[in-house]
Image (cartoon, rainbow, N blue to C red):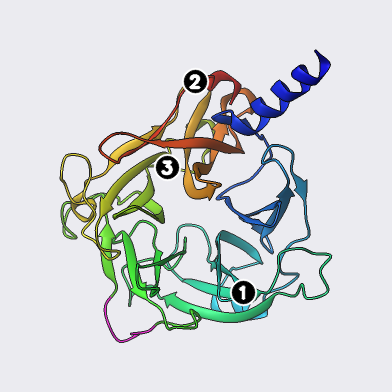
């Protein structure tokens, strides 16, 4: 009987759609190396956590002690680094990150690499390669933050990014993934809350994350307002395309670049807002990783991980069971 009881505990821990992990994070992304999950999030020097079950997390050392080139490039930057993105390619982990100050598009995206994420491995060492792309006020009407690396079916790398201004963009990268492949070309707009660039009003969209599944590329993004605690209105939208550069269409066929986007998940009485998501596939199961503003804790930002399921038409959906406990 005791053996059966322990088995049920283990089964519930690993198979439950809702994985309770209320650690204080913002803009989380997760990757697995061997049997360990590593989480990277916004924070001074980039915050890191590790886990073996996606529920119990241990805080790690920040990626950077200082980032001198960022201080020099962006006025007002004080090593508080935003919205990292982690991926693995050709024996290296690539960590893209944002250097900026709130509400301005004087911003940069940088990249660092490491052969391993295990801190006790003698090979563990982050090598910073500096700036990949920069937006400059007055010159650019887009914002170089919130990076996400996606590879197409041929292995070509692209960087999606953006926040407010003219919306979310995508650009091709070089084969080594450290620079823009075509710096002279204009970035492609893949999502916006405006019907066109001339439309009035705020363009409250950010945090692109592209996930390839079967024949589609799925573009997830966050709309409305983050970072306001109990007043946050963050929510997630999604669209899909057969091409990594779009056009991405929502469930009604409207282009995300023209104000479209199907709601995937939004706040409720337990969470004031939810957003800035990533997706991780674990042993054939997909999970949505994001932060929510906890109504039970004065709107503080917490980690949430939910099982991502797919309907018969290939659209993602999140189970809302046990929402109170999440």
- Residue pictured at 59% horizontal, 82% vertical: 129
- Residue pictured at 44% horizontal, 76% vertical: 134
Badge 1: how crowded within 10 Å, few (<14), some, or many (20+)? Answer: some
Q: Which mark is residue 253?
A: none
- Residue pictured at 71% horizontal, 28% vertical: 10
Q: Which mark is residue 92?
A: 1
**In front of the other: 1 or 326:** 1
The residue tagged 2 is: 321
Residue 180 vertical placement versus 226 (above, below)? below
Residue 142's x, y, as percent?
34, 67
| Horizontal arrangement in the rendering, residue 73 relative to residue 242 (left or right) | right
Could you tell me which secondary element the residue under label 2 belongs to? loop
Badge 3: how crowded within 10 Å, few (<14), some, or many (20+)? Answer: some
Magenta stretch: includes residue 15 = no
Contact flag, marks 2 and 3 (Cβ < 8 Å): no
**In front of the other: 110 or 174:** 174
What's the distance in space between the residues labelled 2 and 3, CA to CA?
25 Å
Which residues, given as a range, are shown in magenta? 181-186
Residue 278's x, y, as percent?
49, 50
Which of the two labelled residues, at mark 2 and mark 3, occupies the earlier sequence position?
3
């Amino acid at each position: 009987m005791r053996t059966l009881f322990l088995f049920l505990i283990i089964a519930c821990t690993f198979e439950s759609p809702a994985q309770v992990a209320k650690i204080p994070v913002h803009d989380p992304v997760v990757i697995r190396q061997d049997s360990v999950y590593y989480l990277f999030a916004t924070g001074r020097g980039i915050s890191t956590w590790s886990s073996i079950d996606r529920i119990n997390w241990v805080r790690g050392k920040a990626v950077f002690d200082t980032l001198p080139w960022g201080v020099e490039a962006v006025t007002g930057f004080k090593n508080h680094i935003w919205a990292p993105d982690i991926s693995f390619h050709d024996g290296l982990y690539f960590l893209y990150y944002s250097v900026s100050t709130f509400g301005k598009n004087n911003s940069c995206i940088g990249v660092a690499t490491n052969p391993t994420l295990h801190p006790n491995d003698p090979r563990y060492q982050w090598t910073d390669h500096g700036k990949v792309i920069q937006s400059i006020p007055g010159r650019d009407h887009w914002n170089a933050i919130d990076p996400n690396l996606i590879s197409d079916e041929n292995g070509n790398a692209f960087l999606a990014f953006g926040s407010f201004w003219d919306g979310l963009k995508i650009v091709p990268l070089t084969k080594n993934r450290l620079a823009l492949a075509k710096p002279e070309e204009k970035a492609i707009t893949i999502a916006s809350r405006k019907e066109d660039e001339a439309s009035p009003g705020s363009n409250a969209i950010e945090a692109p994350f592209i996930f390839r599944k079967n024949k589609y590329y799925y573009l997830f993004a966050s709309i409305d307002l983050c970072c306001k605690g109990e007043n946050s209105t963050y929510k997630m939208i999604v669209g899909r395309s057969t091409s990594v550069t779009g056009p991405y269409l929502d469930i009604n066929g409207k282009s995300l670049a023209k104000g479209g986007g199907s709601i995937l998940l939004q706040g409720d009485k337990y969470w004031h807002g939810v957003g800035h998501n990533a997706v991780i596939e674990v042993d054939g199961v997909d999970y949505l990783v994001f932060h929510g503003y906890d109504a039970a804790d004065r709107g503080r930002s917490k980690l949430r991980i939910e099982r991502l399921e797919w309907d018969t038409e290939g659209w993602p959906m999140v189970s809302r069971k046990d929402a109170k406990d999440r």
